[in-house]
Amino acid sequence: MLALPVGLMTTMKHVFKKPVTRKYPRAKAEMAPRYRGMHYLERYEDGTERCVCCGLCAAACPADAIYMEPAENEKGERIAEVYELNLIRCIFCGFCEEACPEEAIFLGHEFELADDARDKFIVSKDDLLVKHPRKDRSYKTIFRRTRRYH
């Protein structure tokens, strides 16, 4: 007998409160500073890619999600001819970022990774390289600034 008035009181209490839902995708949630999302391959200031295809990121990957083949450019410097990342296998642990001696790969804050076909989850080097010339700050410096260690 008391359940009906208690239920109505609870309903009336929540009717006039502000809703807690977000209007996604127009209002996106703010991600935590330590969140690890989509991978990026960084470039030097002159536009050349940082990755020297040493293979340390692929060796550090526990999911074996990185495949690379080395080559040399016209200056005789070592670069990655093929750099593929399998996002289905990737567990976004960040070990590749920690293992890279050139600070070429890092994980950004993008979280919308859904797609409609499985083959679109194998990302090539052209998709991972940041655009150049870049008008904004480096993704790496933004990420470093937000990273906090306790």
Image (cartoon, rainbow, N blue to C red):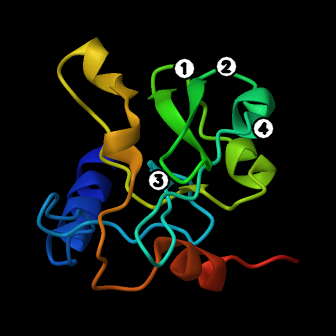
Amino acid type, label 2: Asp
Judged from the image, the secondary structure of the residue bearing numbered disc 2 is: loop
On residue 40, the disc is 3
* Quarter that holds the C terminus: bottom right
**Are circles 1 and 2 on residues that touch, CB within 8 Å?**
yes
Judged from the image, the secondary structure of the residue bearing numbered disc 4 is: helix
Judged from the image, the secondary structure of the residue bearing numbered disc 1 is: loop
Judged from the image, the secondary structure of the residue bearing numbered disc 3 is: strand
Lower position in the chain sequence, tag 1 or tag 2: 2
Q: Nearer the viewer, mark 1 or mark 2?
A: 2
Lower position in the chain sequence, tag 1 or tag 3: 3
Q: Which residue is mark 1?
A: 89
Q: CA distance from mark 2 to mark 3?
A: 17 Å
* Quarter that holds the N terminus: top left
Q: Is residue 68 above or below residue 14?
A: above
**On the picture, is 103 further left or further right than 67?**
right
Task: Decide which of 27, 51 is in the foreground and name it.
Answer: 51
- Image x and y of residue 112, in percent: 30, 46
Q: Nearer the viewer, mark 1 or mark 3?
A: 3
On residue 64, the disc is 2
Dot 3 alpha-carbon crowd within 10 angstroms: few under 14, some 14 to 19, many 20 or more: some
Q: Nearer the viewer, mark 4 or mark 1?
A: 4
Q: CA distance from mark 1 to mark 3?
A: 17 Å
**Residue at the image point whose x is 46% and y is 21% from the top:** 88
Q: Which residue is mark 4?
A: 56
- Image x and y of residue 45, in percent: 47, 78
Q: Is residue 66 above or below residue 101?
A: above
- Image x and y of residue 11, in percent: 21, 60
